[in-house]
Amino acid sequence: MKIQQLRYVREAVRRDFNLTAVAQALHTSQPGVSRQIRDLEEELGIEVFVRAGKRLTGLTGPGQTIVPMIERLLLEAENLRRAGDEFAAQGQGILTIAATHSQARYALPTAVRDFSTVHPQVVLRMHQGSPPQIAQMLISGDADLGIATEALASHPELVTMPCYHWTHSVIVRADHPLSAAADQGVLLTLDELVQFPIMTYETGYTGRRHIDEAFDAQQLNANIVLEAMDADVIKTYVELGMGVGIIAGIAFDPERDLKLRAIDARHLFGINLTRLAIRRGNFLRAYVYDFIETFAPSLTRPVVDEALALSV
C-alpha cells in the first residue's frame, strides 16, 4: 500500500470520480491513476469504486467505509511531515490563510504585518472566498487557518474558536437625508431605512443573515438593488448615489471614505461573531499558534490546545 495510491482514491472522490480530472490535478496520467487504484483494490481484496465500463461512477459499500480511513491516514501523513518540519526547519515554512474579503481587507492587515516582522522566514499565502468556500479549503487541506463568520461552526470537520464581535453600519453620502438626521442625534429605524434603495452583502457573507432577519422580524421588504461580497464595491456605488449601504462597521475608514458617512446600526441588526477555524486533527506548527494569538490575543496556545483536545 502506497501513500500515492491513497491520494488517488481521495482525489477521485473529490473530483466526482472523473479520472481525467484526477490525473490533471495530481500531474500524472489517467491510465496510471486507474492502474494504481486497481492495484490498491487488489491488495485490499475489495472494490472501492462502482464502475460502468472503465468509468468510475460511485463508491461501493466497502468503499464508503474505507474512504474516511484513507482521509485520516493522509491527514496523519501530512501531520508527520509538519512535525518533521517543526524540528528540522524551525521558524521556516508556509502559512496559508483563507478569509472573507472583509476579514482579509480590514481585520487581518495589522496581524499579518506584526506576524511577518517576528517571523520573516514564514511565507504567508492569502486566499479569499465565501464561508462555504473557506470551509472547503480547510477540509481539503488547501488552507491552514480559516477566518469568517459563524457559518464555519456548521462544519463538523472543523474546530472553530471565537475571535471578536462586530456590528454593521449604514453607509450614506454626506449629503444624504439620513446623514442630516444622524447629525441631529435621531436614531435610525428600519422603517426609515426601507424607504431607500439598499446595497449590501451577498447571502452567506459578512452577517447578511442578521440583516435579513431584522427586516423579516418587522415584516418589512427591503429594496435591495445591489449585492456584493466586497464592502469597497458597496461603498463605490453608495458614492455614486445609487442608495444606502449596509456593511461591516470595520469596513468603514473615515480617513479614506471622505465622501461617506457611517451611521451605527448595532441597534438594528444582530451582533456578529468572527470565528477562526482549523481542520480537526491538524498538527499545528509553533508559528501557526503565534499567528493565531497575534490576530486574536485571547486565543493563546493553551486555549487553542484545549479546543483541539475537546474536539477529539
Image (cartoon, rainbow, N blue to C red):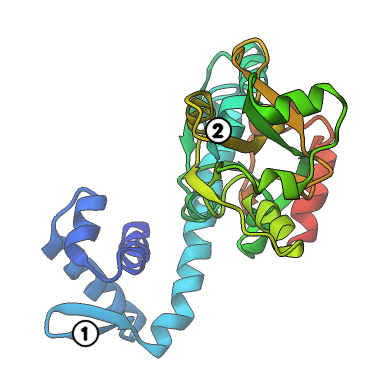
Q: Is residue 214 left or right of residue 227?
A: right
Residue at x 60% of width, y 24% of height:
90
- Which residue type carries mark 2? Ala
Please determine whether, in this image, residue 195 is positioned above or below residue 285: below
- Which residue type carries mark 1? Arg
Residue 75 visible, this orientation: yes
Q: Nearer the viewer, residue 123 or 179?
A: 179
Residue 62 placed where, x, y %? 41, 86
Residue at x 35% of width, y 87% of height:
60
Q: Nearer the viewer, residue 306 or 84?
A: 306
Q: Is residue 62 left or right of residue 30?
A: right
Residue 56 placed where, x, y %? 22, 78
The tag earlier along the polypeptide, 1 or 2, is 1
The residue mark sitting in front, 1 or 2, is 2
Label of residue 51 in the image: 1
Name which quarter of the figure residue 47 lies in: bottom left
Residue 241 placed where, x, y %? 51, 28
Q: Nearer the viewer, residue 258 or 207?
A: 258
Label of residue 25 in the image: none
Residue 280 visible, this orientation: no
Please determine whether, in this image, residue 245 is positioned above or below residue 19: above
> How far apart, in angstroms, are the residues tagged by discs 1 and 2?
47 Å
Numbered disc total: 2
Residue at x 76% of width, y 63% of height:
217
Few, some or many residues within 10 Å of mark 2 (<14, 14–19, 20+): many
Few, some or many residues within 10 Å of mark 1 (<14, 14–19, 20+): some
Residue 188 placed where, x, y %? 79, 39
- Label 2 SS: helix
Image quarter where the C terminus lies is bottom right
Label of residue 231 in the image: 2
Please determine whether, in this image, residue 63 is positioned above or below residue 175: below
